[in-house]
Amino acid sequence: METAALTPEAQALVERVRSLLPVLAKEAAEAEQQRRLTDLQVGALEDSGVFRLMVPRCYGGLELDVDAFLEVGLLLATADVSSAWVTTFLIEHNWMLCQFPERFQKELYADADWILAPGAIAPTGQARAVDGGFRISGRWSWATGVMHSSWVILGTLTDAAEGPGGMMFLALPREDVRVEDVWHVDGMCATGSNDIVVEDVFVPSERSVGILEMAEARAHGASLHGAPLYRTPMIPILEMAASMPIIGRAGAVVRDFAERLQTKSRMNAPGQRAAERPAAQMRLARATVEAREAELLLRDVVGELMVLRDTATRADRHRWAAMITHAVHRSRQVIQDVAEASGGSAHFLDQPLQRALRDVQVASSHVVFDRDAQEEGFGRALLGLEAAGGLV
């Protein structure tokens, strides 16, 4: 895996993350059984300082950019998809919290350098404007990381925000919500992405921000904080958070496959290494090229994102979404191809490959990787047609 030129501070974080990979990998099976990250995994991640990555320096954070986020996310994926997924999203959600009004930001970070908070973006709940804030009720799914969190970020519908349906994010303390244990799935088990239920809770107005404003890079953080990171559109950062665990894992799976071929013997040809079989050589070559292609697509998007930021057009953002979606689906296929070429032994539960196969199958189902929708949006942009609805 190639590493972009980073600041010394960013490189130091990458090395700290690299040192905890054995813990993340060793605990992956236990986390899957628990259906949440283990306390040991979360403690190691916190000790590394990784959750400070996108927190402004004024709050004790590292204030690193999306290039550092990229290297950290791809590296985390080499250990395990689920732990990488939880980590990248919790990092990104600190960026989201720093787009809320300044008063709330100062309250959050007064005694902490980072916050652990899931972000349930789909506006499946309703917020009613009242004096001084909102009354909120509803149910939200896919609350990744909620089992170790102290706050939650919820997408809501209200008549008090601009954009279709008046979509807003509201932030609530963990004790104001109920978490329902519904996360019984065949992949990404360790993310603990349970449901959040809220029943008529008051939320002060300073704990709210418009979703459209955040998507268009003109929420409070864009003017409060000087670093370009905070005037970056939301959806590409979200797509990074969701794609890095998949793309990074594909590269690691291919490298592991190459190592196994060097030591594995052919069952139907005793004494001959699997590496000497032409078909295995061809599969390895193809998987290596395709995994590399996926990573380079993501790197290309991140490079453009750092240049364009809030000046990116909607057509630019559609292109990025289509490129990342293609990279994710290509990565999923790489892992499937390697599993097919690895024989029946790859499917024993003590083999990381079978977990990667299941995790990536589920992770690639995220709504931002809806291939039809993303390719339609980009196709319309290429043809100069009116943009389809939705955030991008």
Image: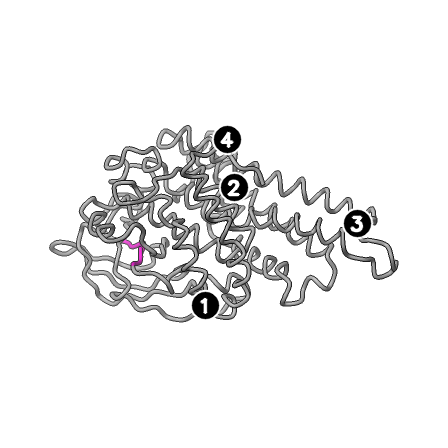
Which residue lies under the disc numbered 3?
A: 275
Label 2 packing within 10 angstroms: few (<14), some (14-19), many (20+):
many
Label 3 packing within 10 angstroms: few (<14), some (14-19), many (20+):
some
SS assignment for the magenta stretch, majority: strand
Residue kind at label 4, given as amino acid type: Leu
**Percent x, y of residue 293:** 61, 38
Contact (Cβ within 8 Å) of mark 3 with mark 4: no
Q: Earlier in the sequence, mark 3 or mark 4?
A: 3
Examine the image and state in which quarter residue 216 appears: top left
Which residue lies under the disc numbered 2?
A: 324
Quarter of the image with the C terminus in it: top left
Which residue lies under the disc numbered 1?
A: 183
Spatial CA span between label 4 and label 2: 17 Å
Compared to 242, does 136 lie above or below? below
Compared to 368, does 139 lie above or below? below
**Percent x, y of residue 66:** 42, 38
Left or right placement of residue 298 versus residue 315 in this view:
right
Label 4 packing within 10 angstroms: few (<14), some (14-19), many (20+):
few
**Which label lies toward us, 2 or 3?**
3
Quarter of the image with the N terminus in it: top right
* Highlighted range, magenta: 151-157
